[in-house]
Amino acid sequence: MSAIRYKIENINSKGEKALTVFLTSGFPNPQKFVKLVLEIEKAGADLIEIGLPFGDSLADGPVIQSSYVEALKSKINLTKTLDYISEIKSKSDIPIILMSSSNPILNYGKNKFCTESKNAKVDGLIIPDVPLEEYDDFFTRDFTQFDKILLTTPTSSEKRIKSIDEKSSGFLYCVSVVGTTGVRNNFDEYVLQNLNRTYKIASKNKMQIGFGISSGEDVKRFSPYCDGVIVGSAVIKSLLTDDEKFTNTIKLVKELKEACKN
């Protein structure tokens, strides 16, 4: 069993939902990024998703895009991101998922990417712009050492959800709404019905819900329909205006984790 799957199952066995926190690599302070990750783990994050900044990322809303712009200004790239992950892994065993568009990986070279990601102890990959139809072409044998986490959306048919679930490993990423990432003030009944539908269809993997979750109340609302939640934009938004000790962001993560217990 992979580290990602094991961690989620362990959390679920306690009657809790897993909390995955998304962070943009090197943001908001390249020198303090490793410290930030370790503080967020201490605050309650069960898994960390690290986004590689990219100028034309798919599905990311304005908040995450703005963090990508700042990270790129700081010259954060794939090599630096893998260095961060390696340093984090030297101090923690928290599972780490690397989220990237396909182009940076192709430019880096698949073999080199896989070798260096393995050395850095990356646990899983999310590459949103590689659709199910291109899965086998993109994920060659070099990628067998990583969990490949695929996304379902509200428009995915039952047949497609089953196929995505079958190809995924680590967990199934269920996108809660149509559109890009970002904080949302409400979720209509259709959203909850779709989450319930997807949760019932997925049989191979644990399922985590992402996009729009920004508060403990959101976590509690979605808990019946998942095994865990992924929070990104709300955390990045907090970091945009936080102090050097990340006080408000740590408080938010603690709130989210507490909601995962209820």
Image (tube, rainbow, N blue to C red):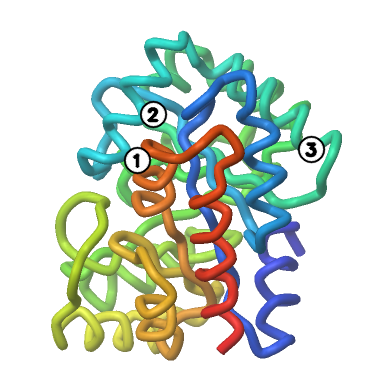
Say whether residue 216 is left or right of residue 212.
right
What residue type is disc 1 on? Val
Q: CA distance from mark 1 to mark 3?
A: 27 Å
Q: Is residue 70 left or right of residue 203?
A: left
Q: Residue at x 42, y 20 (%)?
A: 71
Residue at horizontal 28 percent and vertical 69 percent from the top = 176
The answer to which of marks 1 and 3 sits earlier in the sequence is 3
Name the residue at 36% across, 64% down: 214
Measure how far apart labels 2 and 3 are at the Cα level.
24 Å
Do callouts 2 and 3 mark residues in contact (Cβ within 8 Å)? no
Return the residue at label 3. 89
Q: Residue at x 25, y 64 (%)?
A: 153
Type of the residue with mark 3: Lys
Q: Nearer the viewer, residue 184 or 139?
A: 184
Tell me the SS state at disc 1. Answer: loop
Q: Quadrant of the image for the N terminus?
A: bottom right
Name the amino acid, label 2.
Answer: Ser
The Cα–Cα distance between marks 1 and 2, rounded to whole angstroms, is 7 Å
Relative vertical location of residue 142 with respect to residue 1 in this rendering, above or below: above
Where residue 86 sits: x, y (%)? Answer: 75, 28
Image mark for residue 102: 2
Tell me the quarter of the picture where residue 45 sits. Answer: bottom right
Which residue extends farthest right? 90
Which quadrant, please, contains the C terminus?
A: bottom right
| Residue nearest the observer in this picture, 24 or 57 | 24
Q: Earlier in the sequence, mark 1 or mark 2?
A: 2
Find out whether the residues at labels 1 and 2 contact each other: C-beta distance under 8 Å: yes
- Callout 3 crowding tier (Cα within 10 Å): few <14, some 14–19, many ≥20: some
Q: Tell me if mark 1 has few (under 14), some (14-19) or many (20+) residues whose alpha carbon lies within 10 angstroms of its own.
A: some
Q: Which residue does the numbered mark 1 point to in the structure image?
A: 130
